[in-house]
Amino acid sequence: MAIRSSACAQNTRNRIRQLEEAQPGIERSNRGLFSSDYERLSRETLLMERRTILELRNQRVINDDILRIIQHDIDLAEARLAPRRN
Protein backbone atom coordinates (compact mmCIF):
# COMPACT_ATOMS: atom_id res chain seq x y z
CA MET A 1 0.00 0.00 0.00
CA ALA A 2 2.80 2.42 0.84
CA ILE A 3 4.34 2.06 -2.58
CA ARG A 4 0.98 2.54 -4.30
CA SER A 5 0.09 5.71 -2.35
CA SER A 6 3.57 7.13 -2.91
CA ALA A 7 3.28 6.44 -6.64
CA CYS A 8 -0.15 8.06 -6.67
CA ALA A 9 1.22 11.17 -4.97
CA GLN A 10 4.11 11.32 -7.43
CA ASN A 11 1.67 11.01 -10.33
CA THR A 12 -0.33 13.88 -8.87
CA ARG A 13 2.76 16.08 -8.61
CA ASN A 14 3.79 15.17 -12.17
CA ARG A 15 0.34 16.10 -13.47
CA ILE A 16 0.51 19.45 -11.68
CA ARG A 17 3.83 20.18 -13.38
CA GLN A 18 2.40 19.16 -16.77
CA LEU A 19 -0.56 21.49 -16.35
CA GLU A 20 1.69 24.37 -15.32
CA GLU A 21 3.99 23.84 -18.31
CA ALA A 22 1.10 23.47 -20.78
CA GLN A 23 0.25 27.16 -20.59
CA PRO A 24 3.41 29.14 -21.43
CA GLY A 25 3.15 32.89 -21.25
CA ILE A 26 0.21 32.82 -18.86
CA GLU A 27 0.80 34.18 -15.40
CA ARG A 28 1.11 31.22 -13.07
CA SER A 29 -1.17 32.00 -10.19
CA ASN A 30 -2.27 29.19 -7.90
CA ARG A 31 -5.76 30.60 -7.58
CA GLY A 32 -8.20 28.90 -9.88
CA LEU A 33 -5.60 26.78 -11.66
CA PHE A 34 -7.27 23.50 -10.70
CA SER A 35 -10.85 22.44 -10.16
CA SER A 36 -12.06 22.15 -6.59
CA ASP A 37 -12.44 18.37 -7.04
CA TYR A 38 -8.85 18.09 -8.23
CA GLU A 39 -7.61 20.15 -5.29
CA ARG A 40 -9.62 18.05 -2.84
CA LEU A 41 -8.28 14.79 -4.29
CA SER A 42 -4.75 16.17 -4.31
CA ARG A 43 -5.00 17.14 -0.65
CA GLU A 44 -6.40 13.71 0.24
CA THR A 45 -3.55 12.04 -1.66
CA LEU A 46 -0.94 14.16 0.09
CA LEU A 47 -2.51 13.40 3.47
CA MET A 48 -2.40 9.69 2.68
CA GLU A 49 1.24 10.03 1.71
CA ARG A 50 2.00 11.81 5.00
CA ARG A 51 0.38 9.01 6.97
CA THR A 52 2.20 6.37 4.95
CA ILE A 53 5.65 7.86 5.47
CA LEU A 54 4.99 8.12 9.21
CA GLU A 55 4.05 4.43 9.24
CA LEU A 56 7.22 3.59 7.31
CA ARG A 57 9.32 5.55 9.80
CA ASN A 58 7.57 3.90 12.75
CA GLN A 59 8.27 0.50 11.20
CA ARG A 60 11.91 1.56 10.74
CA VAL A 61 11.70 1.18 6.96
CA ILE A 62 12.89 4.79 6.57
CA ASN A 63 14.82 6.94 9.01
CA ASP A 64 14.04 10.44 10.30
CA ASP A 65 16.21 12.12 7.67
CA ILE A 66 14.32 10.49 4.82
CA LEU A 67 11.03 11.27 6.55
CA ARG A 68 11.90 14.99 6.67
CA ILE A 69 12.95 15.03 3.01
CA ILE A 70 9.66 13.49 1.93
CA GLN A 71 7.68 15.75 4.26
CA HIS A 72 9.35 18.76 2.66
CA ASP A 73 8.37 17.49 -0.79
CA ILE A 74 4.76 17.07 0.38
CA ASP A 75 4.82 20.59 1.85
CA LEU A 76 5.91 21.98 -1.52
CA ALA A 77 3.17 20.06 -3.32
CA GLU A 78 0.57 21.44 -0.91
CA ALA A 79 1.88 24.97 -1.41
CA ARG A 80 1.18 24.68 -5.14
CA LEU A 81 -2.50 24.14 -4.43
CA ALA A 82 -4.83 27.07 -3.83
CA PRO A 83 -5.46 28.01 -0.23
CA ARG A 84 -8.21 26.02 1.42
CA ARG A 85 -11.66 27.54 1.26
CA ASN A 86 -13.39 27.44 4.64
Image: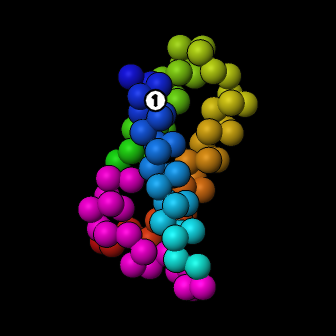
| Magenta highlight on residue 12 | no
Residue furthest right in the image:
65
The answer to whether residue 41 is above or below residue 59 is below
Q: How is the image coloured?
A: rainbow
Taking the image as shown, residue 47 lies to the left or right of residue 77, namely left
x 51%, y 43%: residue: 10
Instruction: Point out the image quarter for the C terminus.
Output: bottom left
Tell me residue 49's x, y (percent). 46, 37
Q: Amino acid at mark 1?
A: Thr
- How many marks can you see? 1
x 59%, y 15%: residue: 61
Q: Quadrant of residue 36?
A: bottom left
**Is residue 78 among the parts visible in the rendering?**
no
x 44%, y 79%: residue: 31
Q: Which residue is mark 1?
A: 52
Q: Secondary structure at mark 1?
A: helix
| Magenta highlight on residue 38 | yes
The answer to whether residue 54 is above or below residue 45 is above
Tell me residue 16's x, y (percent). 49, 60
First to last magenta residue range: 25-43
Q: Mark 1: give few (<14), some (14-19) or many (20+) Cα within 10 Å.
A: some
Tell me residue 18's x, y (percent). 52, 61
